[in-house]
Amino acid sequence: MLAPLGVEIRMSASVGAADVLAVAQHADAVINTYAQLPAELVDRFERCRIIARTGIGIDTVDLAAATARGIVVTNVPEYCEDEVSDHAMALMLALARNVTRGNTLVHGGSWDLAAVKPIYRVRGRTVGLVGFGKIARLVAAKAQGFGLGVLAFDPYVDPADAAALGVELVPLEELLARSDFVSVHAPLTPETRHMIGAEALALMRPEAVVVNTARGGLVDVVALAEALDRGAIAGAGLDVLPDEPPGADMPLYGRPNVILTPHTAFYSEESVLDLQVKAAQQVALVLTGQDPVYPVNL
């Protein structure tokens, strides 16, 4: 994608600011996955015309700073929708059927049905989707295939659009109170940080579970641990955490009713190839004077 343009590619030694600046200060384009690009770093990019984020979220980039310098910021919003929605469903089903707890018991030499009780029938229960974008809509369709009812909360979605997909759009408080599975699919913004915190968890059913495959900062893990401790909810499945990798004091370790995966929901061999190709495509378009397909700040 970039080789025919004669582009020289320089790799940063790490995501640290000094290493990023060493390769990006005089670059025409920056392709970024995990590095934080705050204003003080973006302001030192002397020739940059595009910052291409290899991912969906753009919370690692200071958009205001990039825009002020005339730098186009792009993401790749269409590359892992099936993978993330599959992962969300996998976490919900594994929690519903106590799969990981049963697996641990059997591997440890125990064959005990009582140890994995209670298990409830999935069909007829309710999934609440916090955010109703593309991935959440795929979760809705897959959940409906298992006989689950679907609620959604999203202040930017027309209720008629949700109803056309067989989904009832409701306020967040109502969603939390009615759902057996709460699956989080919102972007991380100052307004949404810790939106699943102590107050939200207090509204949930004791038999309900929380699943997060979006952004770690959306769920307050300390409040979640406290809710689990007092039996306010039944379990959680998290693919993302506020700090990655988490520290040794992360309060959700060692709980049989909590499934933790290492930010792998996005991953498949196919999705990674899509991601790399589409991010490079945005750079190629901008460097040749064309409009990118996935602009965030134009």
Image: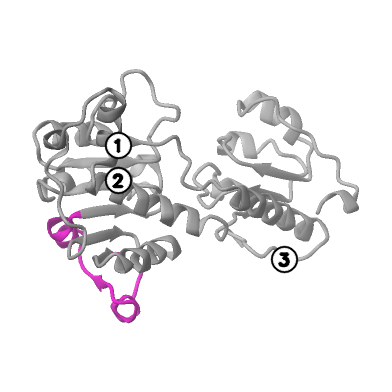
Q: What amino acid type should be assigned to the residue bearing mark 3? A: Asp
Query: Of the residues shown, which amino acid type is indicated by label 2?
Result: Ala
Q: Which colour scheme is used?
A: one colour
Marks 1 and 2, the one that precedes in the sequence:
2
Q: Please provide the residue range marked out in magenta.
A: 153-180
Secondary structure of the residue carrying tag 3 is: loop
Distance between the Cα atoms at labels 1 and 2? 7 Å
Q: Which of marks 3 and 1 is in front?
A: 1
Of discs 2 and 3, which sits in the foreground? 2
User: What residue would you read off at disc 3?
Assistant: 291
Say whether marks 3 and 1 touch (CB < 8 Å). Answer: no
Q: Which residue does the numbered mark 2 point to in the structure image?
A: 94
x and y percent of residue 101 in the render?
Answer: 25, 34
Residue in the picture at 55% in, 37% down: 38
- Work out which quarter of the rendered image holds the N terminus and state it: bottom right
Residue 61 shows in this picture: yes
Front residue of 274/287: it is 274
Q: Which mark is residue 100?
A: 1
In the depicted view, which residue is nearer to us: 16 or 99?
99
Badge 1 amino acid = Thr
Q: In this view, does 103 lie to the left or right of 200?
A: right
